[in-house]
Every structure is written in structure tokens, then in C-alpha cells.
Image (spheres, grey):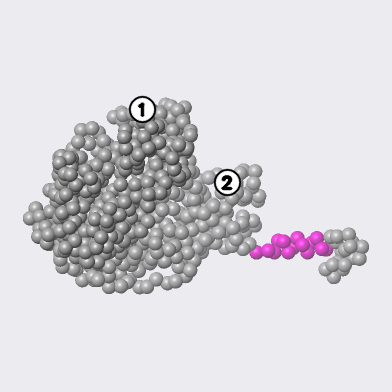
């Protein structure tokens, strides 16, 4: 009460102060607890199963376990296993009132199960809020997330962040359509080109679980073949999941599925769809309205009911590896799903990775390949230009492109578009002294100097500073030469050589999906090649040394995969399709390209890695940190008897302005 109330005796009908205090206390006790993110002080607990086991959204490994919370009676109906909840986390023992723990910050989580009692002997905090009664997490998805977390030494909360998309209230309010009846079993179609293709489709339609590594023939038929495999799986009442590397591949399979099945039978899960639409599609899959799912790597956790087939296209693509912790790869996740759900497995692509070859060598999967006659009929003619050819070629020394390449471009432009694959983007990403070949470096940060279009000043590729008065620190010369020529510079040179032909570029800044069948030059970086109507008449694969010379265990495998992806867009040899690869013909990946034999290349790589003990024959883990921390880790860790420890060795210091590699120290730190 204020002093004025004491003086006038007013307030609440001139009641005495003692009566006012009694009224306030009665009102305070009569307040009904509301479903707010609070502590539910004074609220009664649920009469049955009053304990909720919750996984809190904390990605740290020492909190990778379940925590028990009390269930208020008002939340009893909505607090079911699998729903999203919010809880108070971090309350200490000193924050206990009436036998309930209070305090702590609000944290999101998932309700895993309801129990009659708790293993924890102390007081329990109450559930703060049931975010939504939608049960988004079931036992199957939880088991898969747990397997992935164990496989990658990560936390369950981190995996569930990747597996369950963010909530959209408007999407949850919309009802999902009723599931459609199974479609009829499809004909094998172009699967008949493969030795066991028709049998594979028949096994899917009959409810079997075949496991195959599919080496696809060149051409655009791969999307329709994937769609037929999905349709065969749906025909027996089971679900199918297809994971593709990018949105362009998803669009092609989406169009093929729509042509075979019609609208409403499959869902598309990509990041480009937006959070609300993507969550609505995910809910349709979770509720059982849709049994077929296609998408990028985020779709690898899609909760498809009665899963009968998991398929992955082009498993060597880097986009299949999730950059967020614990960084699972779509191939490994789908392998876990195939083993967990005992469903069919299909790993396909124009190339063949070492991991795919290992699946066949161990007998876990069967090869799904075409006969050599079919390969020769579908593949283009591949010709190579090596170092000796370049040394004898006057045109190559003057213009970087050998005479054979110019002839292939000229002949191809008479019949249609020509694809030119350049492994470097930009204009001139690397410059060097013309006299002594010393790389041109920035005087501020020692970054590489890059040439710009129009002959303007040089610019640093790291800090962006312009350099207008460069001279070589070794010999003092002022002239520069291009070490590496990018896609834009190549397009400029080809435009000058063929002035009457349009030149199109496709790269990171602007990726083309398709190009018309009219004659044109299409300059593209690897992975951004557009599809030409009717196929390309010819293709040039330039600067093979740049792809093969990378200091990487997968350099040869990755170069062959990118070459095959570009060559597969070219017309068959019978239609005049020609591919010219500017690379040393004696190298193993180049020979595999000429023979169109990615499986043989992968098997040879696998045997050599087995001799050296390299992955995937062995498992390797890298631990980075300060010297004392790494030493303490090695003293504490219990390794198997056959484990081999390499190092420790000092990591190079990361320069300022350069991108950090995984596990590298912050810039300037040791």
C-alpha cells in the first residue's frame, strides 16, 4: 500500500490493510498455470507416466544423453513421444522450490519417451512447453540418427538438426492428402541395355531387396532409368528415396517421375524450395501421404514409410558430404538405412568411386553394367593430346589450344553446339614472371595476383588490392605470363577465333541448365555443364594437368569423374560425337577415359590403396590441437592393437585472408 492509501483508508472498498493482503494472496493462489515457457510452479503433474525423457538441443558431446523432466497435467495430452518441446536447462541444486527444480535457460529439444519414474534421484524440472503436438520423430528416424552419430563420432542432437527441418506453423496446420494407390509395375525400358537391368527392375517390383552398383551408360537416359526404379518400388506398396548431387539433377529426375507417375506421387526436398514448402513436403512424407522422395543431401534422412529402395546418383560429388557437424556423407547414411530397413540399394553414376568398387569386391552389392558393345554404341570417340603432341604443334605453343582441338571445334560447330570444359573459373587466376616463371605475389599479403578483363591492373586473389607497378623480386623483370587461364579468358579467345558463333559461359556465378541445339560454344567449369538438346557435337577437355596435378588422394578419380560427366553429354560416335582431352595419354585416368572403363580404374585404385593401407580399406581419423592437448589425448586414448599412429606433426600456420581447412588453426596461431 502507498502512504496515500494509509491516510485516506481507500482502495478495495475501504478494506483494512490486513484484508487487502489476504485478497492479494488469494488471487495469487487462484492463478491457473498457463502453457508458457515457465517453471509451472504449483501445477499438478500428470497422473500416468509423469516423467518425460528429453533430448536437449545441445551439440556438445558430454551432453549427448537424455534428461528427465516432470510432465505437468496441462501438457499431458500433447506431450507425446516425438514432439518438439522446450525445457529449462542448467538449473542448479540451489534452485529448488517445493521439490521442483527451477531456473535455467530455455532450450529446444525432442521428447523421446514417457516413463513412470526417473533414474535421477533429485528433483526434476517441469517441461516448459510443448512447441507443437506434431510427432516429427519416430523410433526409426531416432535409430538412424543414433547410428549416424556413432558412425561419425558426433552427437545425436547435431544429427537431428540435419534430419528434422525447422518447424513452420502454417505448414503444420495444412492437412496432407490421402495416399494414392500403388501404380502398375513399369516396363524395363532402357534398363534392358544393361546385362542385369531388367532383372533388377523386376526384383524391385516383386518386393525384393537387390543391392547394385550401377555404371550408367552415357546419355540423358539415366534420369528415366532412376524414375523406373522408383516406380517399380512403388508398385509393390513400398517407398523409395533418391538422393542427387544438385538441384539440376533433381529437376531432371522430377520431370521423369512426373512423366511416369503423374502429379502428387512424389515429394521434392531441396533447400531452394524455401523453409515452409520444404517442411510441408517433409510432413507429407512423415504422415505417409507420399511414398517417393527425391532431393539433395538433406533428403537422406527423409522419413519414408515402408522404405523399399534407397538410391544415390554420382556419389563422388563433393556436395553429398554435409559441411555441418558431424559431416555425414549421403552414401554412408544410405548404406546404414539399407542395412537398418533391409531394403534395396542402388549406387549409380557415369563414373565409379573406390568406395563403390569396394562394395562390389566385398560381395555386398552386385555390378550393374552394360556389355562392351553397348558402351561403344553409346560413347563418343575420345582422342587425346599429350605433351609430345603439344611440343610438335606450332598452334598449341602460340594459342594454348592444339590443332586437333581447333579441328574438333570447327567440325563440331557445323553440326551443333560444342562444349569446352575449363578446370579454372575467372579470367587469369594465376600469373608468373615471363622471364624466370616466379609466381606473382601480392606485396601486402603474399596472395596470388590475378589478371583482369580488359587489360586492367592486377588484383590480389586474397585481399583484393590492386597492383599497378609489379616487378619480379627474383630477376627484376616487369613482364608477366599466364600460368593458368580461366573460363572467361578461354571464352574470350574462342570468341575471337570464331566470331560468327555465339559463346555462352556456365560457372559458379551463372550456371546454365540447358542450351539449344543450334551451333554455339559453351565454356563451362567442371560440374556446371548444361545439357544440350540432342547432345553436344564435340567437347574439349582442357588443362588436364590442372586436375590431375592436385595434391589429393582422389585427384585421378575425381578428374576421371568430371571428364566422364562432360563426355556423357556428347553424342555417340555413330552420330559424329568427338571428345578431345588435353592431357598426357599415358596416365591411368586418361586411358580409362579413352576406353570408357571407370570400373577398371576404380578396381586398380582399390588394390593399390589396399597395399598401402589407405581408405576405404582402412579407417583414418585426424586430431588437431595445441601440442600439449594432442599429447594428452594420445596418452589417454585406448586404440586397438592393430591401430597405427602417424605423427604428431606441426600444422602449417594459416595465413591471414586464406580460407581455413578443416582442423587448421586460426590465422596466425600455431
Q: Nearer the viewer, residue 76 or 435?
A: 435
* Number of residues whose C-alpha sits closer than 10 Å to that of mark 2, classed few (under 14), some (14–19) or many (20 or more): few
Mark count: 2
Q: Residue furthest right?
A: 7
Which segment did they paint magenta? 19-32
Residue 396 marker: none
The residue where tag 1 is placed is 647
Instruction: From the image, give the main secondary structure of the stretch colored magenta.
Output: helix
Q: Earlier in the sequence, mark 1 or mark 2?
A: 2
Which residue: 77% across, 62% down? 24
| Residue 199 percent coordinates (x, y) | 13, 60
Circle 2: element type: loop
The answer to whether 206 appears left or right of 114 in the picture is left
| Residue 330 percent coordinates (x, y) | 32, 51
With respect to residue 646, does 68 lie above or below?
below
Quadrant for residue 394, please give it.
top left
With respect to residue 400, does 298 lie above or below?
below
The residue where tag 2 is placed is 90
Q: Nearer the viewer, residue 336 or 461?
A: 461
Circle 1: element type: loop
Q: Nearer the viewer, residue 168 or 304?
A: 168
Is 264 contained in the magenta span? no
| Residue 260 percent coordinates (x, y) | 23, 70
Note whether residue 85 is visible. yes
If the image is split into quadrants, where does the N terminus sit? bottom right
Which residue: 85% across, 60% down? 2
Amino acid at each position: 500500500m502507498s502512504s496515500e492509501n494509509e491516510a485516506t483508508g481507500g482502495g478495495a472498498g475501504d478494506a483494512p490493510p490486513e484484508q487487502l493482503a489476504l485478497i492479494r494472496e488469494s488471487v495469487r493462489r487462484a492463478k491457473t498455470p498457463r502453457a508458457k515457457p515457465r517453471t509451472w510452479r504449483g501445477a499438478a503433474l500428470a497422473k500416468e507416466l509423469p516423467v518425460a525423457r528429453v533430448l536437449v538441443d545441445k551439440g556438445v558431446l558430454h551432453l549427448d544423453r537424455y534428461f528427465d523432466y516432470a510432465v505437468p497435467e496441462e501438457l499431458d495430452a500433447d506431450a507425446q513421444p516425438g514432439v518438439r518441446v522446450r525445457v529449462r536447462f542448467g538449473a542448479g541444486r540451489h534452485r529448488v522450490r517445493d521439490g521442483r527444480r527451477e531456473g535455467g535457460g530455455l532450450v529446444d529439444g525432442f521428447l523421446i519417451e514417457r516413463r513412470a519414474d526417473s533414474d535421477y534421484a533429485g528433483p526434476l524440472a517441469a517441461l516448459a512447453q510443448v512447441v507443437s503436438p506434431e510427432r516429427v520423430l519416430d523410433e526409426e528416424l531416432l535409430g538412424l540418427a543414433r547410428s549416424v552419430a556413432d558412425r561419425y563420432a558426433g552427437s545425436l542432437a547435431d544429427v537431428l538438426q540435419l534430419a528434422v527441418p525447422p518447424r513452420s506453423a502454417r505448414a503444420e496446420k495444412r492437412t496432407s492428402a490421402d495416399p494414392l494407390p500403388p501404380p502398375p509395375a513399369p516396363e524395363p525400358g532402357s534398363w534392358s541395355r544393361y546385362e542385369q537391368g531388367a532383372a533388377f527392375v523386376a526384383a524391385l517390383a516383386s518386393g525384393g531387396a537387390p543391392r547394385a552398383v550401377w555404371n550408367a551408360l552415357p546419355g540423358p537416359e539415366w534420369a528415366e532409368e532412376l524414375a523406373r526404379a522408383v516406380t517399380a518400388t512403388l508398385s509393390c506398396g513400398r517407398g523409395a528415396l533418391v538422393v542427387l548431387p544438385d538441384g539440376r539433377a533433381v529437376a531432371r529426375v522430377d520431370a521423369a517421375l512426373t512423366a511416369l507417375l503423374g502429379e502428387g506421387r512424389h515429394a521434392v526436398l531441396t533447400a531452394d524450395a524455401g523453409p515452409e514448402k520444404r517442411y510441408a513436403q517433409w510432413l507429407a512424407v512423415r504422415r505417409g501421404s507420399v511414398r517417393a522422395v527425391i532431393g539433395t543431401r538433406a533428403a537422406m534422412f527423409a522419413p519414408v514409410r515402408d522404405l523399399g529402395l534407397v538410391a544415390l546418383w554420382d556419389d563422388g560429388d563433393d556436395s553429398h558430404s554435409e559441411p555441418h557437424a558431424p559431416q555425414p556423407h549421403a552414401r554412408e547414411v544410405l548404406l546404414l538405412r539399407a542395412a537398418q530397413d533391409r531394403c534395396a540399394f542402388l549406387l549409380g553414376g557415369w563414373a565409379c568411386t573406390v568406395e563403390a568398387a569396394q562394395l562390389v569386391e566385398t560381395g555386398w552389392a552386385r555390378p550393374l553394367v552394360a556389355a562392351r558393345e553397348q558402351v561403344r554404341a553409346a560413347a563418343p570417340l575420345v582422342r587425346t593430346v599429350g605433351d609430345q603432341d603439344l611440343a610438335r604443334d606450332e598452334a598449341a605453343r602460340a594459342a594454348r589450344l592444339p590443332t586437333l582441338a581447333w579441328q574438333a571445334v570447327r567440325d563440331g560447330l557445323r553440326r551443333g553446339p560444342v562444349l569446352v570444359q575449363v578446370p579454372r573459373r575467372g579470367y587469369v587466376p594465376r600469373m608468373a614472371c615471363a622471364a624466370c616463371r616466379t609466381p606473382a605475389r601480392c606485396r601486402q599479403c603474399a596472395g596470388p595476383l590475378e589478371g583482369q578483363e580488359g587489360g586492367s591492373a592486377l588484383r590480389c586473389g586474397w585481399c583484393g588490392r590492386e597492383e599497378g607497378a609489379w616487378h619480379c623480386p627474383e630477376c627484376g623483370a616487369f613482364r608477366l605470363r599466364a600460368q593458368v587461364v580461366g573460363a572467361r579468358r578461354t571464352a574470350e579467345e574462342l570468341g575471337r577465333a570464331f566470331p560468327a558463333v555465339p559463346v555462352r559461359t556456365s560457372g559458379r556465378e551463372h550456371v546454365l541448365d540447358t542450351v539449344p541445339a543450334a551451333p554455339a560454344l559453351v565454356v563451362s567449369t567442371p560440374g556446371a555443364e548444361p545439357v544440350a538438346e540432342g547432345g553436344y557435337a564435340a567437347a574439349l577437355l582442357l588443362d588436364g594437368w590442372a586436375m590431375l596435378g592436385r595434391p589429393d588422394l582422389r585427384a585421378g578419380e575425381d578428374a576421371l569423374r568430371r571428364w566422364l560427366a562432360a563426355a556423357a553429354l556428347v553424342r555417340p560416335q555413330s552420330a559424329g560425337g568427338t571428345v578431345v582431352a588435353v592431357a598426357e595419354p599415358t596416365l591411368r585416368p586418361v586411358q580409362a577415359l579413352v576406353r570408357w572403363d571407370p570400373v577398371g580404374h576404380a578396381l586398380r585404385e582399390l588394390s593399390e590403396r589396399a597395399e598401402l593401407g589407405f581408405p576405404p580399406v582402412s579407417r583414418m581419423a585426424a586430431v588437431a590441437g595445441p601440442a600439449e592437448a594432442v599429447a594428452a589425448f594420445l596418452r589417454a586414448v585406448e586404440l586397438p592393437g592393430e591401430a597405427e599412429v602417424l605423427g604428431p606433426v606441426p600444422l602449417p600456420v594459416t595465413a591471414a585472408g586464406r580460407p581455413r581447412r578443416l582442423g587448421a588453426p586460426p590465422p596466425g596461431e600455431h
